Image (cartoon, grey):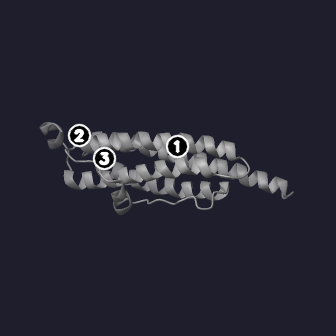
Amino acid sequence: MGTRGRQIVGLDVDDLVKRLNSALADEWLAHYQYWVGSKVVMGPMKEAAIAELVQHAADEMRHAEMVSLRIVQLGGTPVLKPEDWYRISGCGYDAPEDPFIQKVLEQNIRGEQCAIGVYDGLVRLASGRDMVTYNMAQAILADEVEHEEDLQSLLEDYESMIERARGER
């Protein structure tokens, strides 16, 4: 990173890089969780779920690119080994061992809710201290909020369809 660009960051840059690497690990794991979920998901409304999961996987990869670029701009090194993702991730990975649509959606909703917490924390940390990180985190936060809404809406549609099929509505 440029010397002046690092100097204007009103935060402990090493701590910020550590937090960003944790977010980067989350993004890689989220990307894989969405991607593999799109391959194994089963049940009614499977095609709608696949479309949503594939789109979210692409968004998570874009987020990983944004976060890794910011880490480099700050003079840090993005996490280098995939095996470290599990160690430094704040949100973890929830394998779709039960590929039924309801379970896959619930797992990914939990992941999005964790990501919302991560980026809300980064936004609050960087506010007024590091506008570049702030703007990046704010943009990703908006995506994560939208993802949660998308997944919850799809789950609600699924649950409504099941209720109708059972004659409960």
As drawn, is 78 to the left or to the right of 36? left
- Circle 3 Cα neighbour tier, 10 Å, few/some/many (<14 / 14–19 / ≥20): some
Disc 3 marks a residue whose amino acid type is: Ser
Disc 1 marks a residue whose amino acid type is: His
Q: What's the distance in space between the residues labelled 3 and 2, CA to CA?
A: 18 Å
Q: Secondary structure at mark 3?
A: loop
Disc 2 marks a residue whose amino acid type is: Gln
Q: Quadrant of the image for the N terminus?
A: top left
Tell me residue 111's x, y (percent).
50, 56
Tell me residue 76's x, y (percent).
22, 47
The disc, 1 or 3, on the residue closer to the chain's N-terminal end is: 1
Tell me residue 78's x, y (percent).
28, 48
As drawn, is 89 to the left or to the right of 104? left
- Circle 2 Cα neighbour tier, 10 Å, few/some/many (<14 / 14–19 / ≥20): some
Which residue is tagged 3? 127
The disc, 3 or 2, on the residue closer to the chain's N-terminal end is: 2
Labels 1, 3: front one = 1
Q: Secondary structure at mark 1?
A: helix
Which residue is tagged 1? 56
The residue at 24%/46% (across/down) is: 129
As drawn, is 162 to the left or to the right of 133? right
Q: Nearer the viewer, residue 24 or 136?
A: 24
Is mark 3 in CB contact (under 8 Å) with mark 2?
A: no
Q: Nearer the viewer, residue 92 or 82?
A: 82
Residue 73 is tagged as 2
Labels 3, 2: front one = 2
Residue 108 is tagged as none
Query: Is residue 157 visible in the rendered structure shown here?
Result: yes
Q: Secondary structure at mark 2?
A: helix
Q: What's the distance in space between the residues labelled 2 and 1, CA to CA?
A: 26 Å
Tell me residue 108's x, y (percent).
55, 54
